[in-house]
Amino acid sequence: MQKERELSVFFFVLCCACLVMIFRFSSQTSNQSNTLSGRLSGAVCDFLEKERLMPPGEKERYYQNINFFLRKCAHFTEYFLLGLCLSLFFHYRRRFFPRKTAAWVLLLSFLFACGDEIHQIFVSARTPAMRDVFIDTAGAFFAVLLLYALLKGRRNRKLAPDSPQTRFP
C-alpha cells in the first residue's frame, strides 16, 4: 500500500513536469520553435542530400515537409508522455477501473490540449490548430493503449499456470 502511494505521488509529479514542459514549448515564439525543430530538419535534409536521396533543387521543399512532420511528432510525443504518466498515476491510485482511467486520461489530455492551443493565441506569431488537439489526444490515446496492453499481458502471465515462465524443465 505504501509503495503504491509513493508511486502515485511520483507519477503525479511526472504529470506536472509534463504539463510544465508542454506549456514551456507552447510559450515559445514561432521563431524559437522553428529554430528548435529546424536544426533537426536541416540535419535530416543535409543527410538526404549527401546520400543523394533527394532530387537536386528540392531541399527547401523537403525541409518544409520534414519540419512539419517533426513538429507534429513532437506534439504526439509530449502528450504520449503525459498520457503515460496520467495512466500510471491513476493505476497506482487504484481509484478507477481501466476503462474509467482511460476515459479520465483522454478527457484530461484533450482539455489540456485545448487549453494549450488557446494559450498559443497569446504567443507571438503562433496560431491555434484543432489538428494539433487531435494529434495531442492521439498521443495520449496510444499511451493508454500501450499501458493497457502491457498491464494486461503482465496479468495474463501471472494467471497462466502453464506459461513458460512458471514451468520447470
Image (tube, helix red, strand yellow):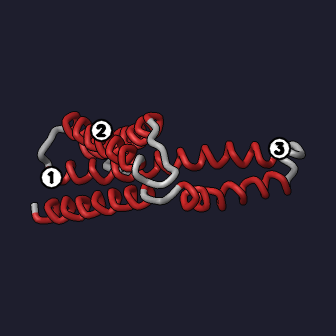
**Neighbour class for label 2 at 10 Å: few (<14), some, many (≥20)?**
many
Q: Residue at x 46, y 38 (%)?
A: 129
The quadrant the N terminus occupies is bottom left
Q: Residue at x 60, y 44 (%)?
A: 69
Q: Residue at x 85, y 57 (%)?
A: 50
Q: Amino acid at mark 2?
A: Leu
**On screen, residue 151 above or below 92:** above
Considering the numbered disc 1 on the image, is that residue within a helix, a strand or a loop? Answer: helix
Residue at far right of view: 56
Task: Say whether residue 161 is visible.
Answer: no
Distance of mark 3 from mark 1, alpha carbons?
52 Å
Query: In the shown orientation, is residue 69 left or right of residue 100?
Result: right
Query: In the shown orientation, is residue 83 left or right of residue 41?
Result: left
Contact between marks 1 and 2 (CB within 8 A): the answer is no
Distance of mark 1 from mark 2, alpha carbons?
17 Å
Query: In the shown orientation, is residue 72 left or right of residue 103?
Result: right
Q: Amino acid at mark 1?
A: Arg
Q: Position of residue 36 (x, y in %)?
A: 58, 61
* Residue where numbered disc 1 is placed: 93
Q: Earlier in the sequence, mark 2 or mark 3?
A: 3
Q: Earlier in the sequence, mark 1 or mark 2?
A: 1
Q: Amino acid at mark 3?
A: Glu
The residue mark sitting in front, 2 or 3, is 3
The residue mark sitting in front, 1 or 2, is 2
Task: Say whether residue 50 is visible.
Answer: yes
**Neighbour class for label 3 at 10 Å: few (<14), some, many (≥20)?**
few
Considering the numbered disc 3 on the image, is that residue within a helix, a strand or a loop? Answer: loop
Question: In the image, which disc is placed on residue 106?
Answer: 2
Q: Residue at x 41, y 42 (%)?
A: 136
**On screen, residue 81 above or below 6:** above
* Residue where numbered disc 3 is placed: 58
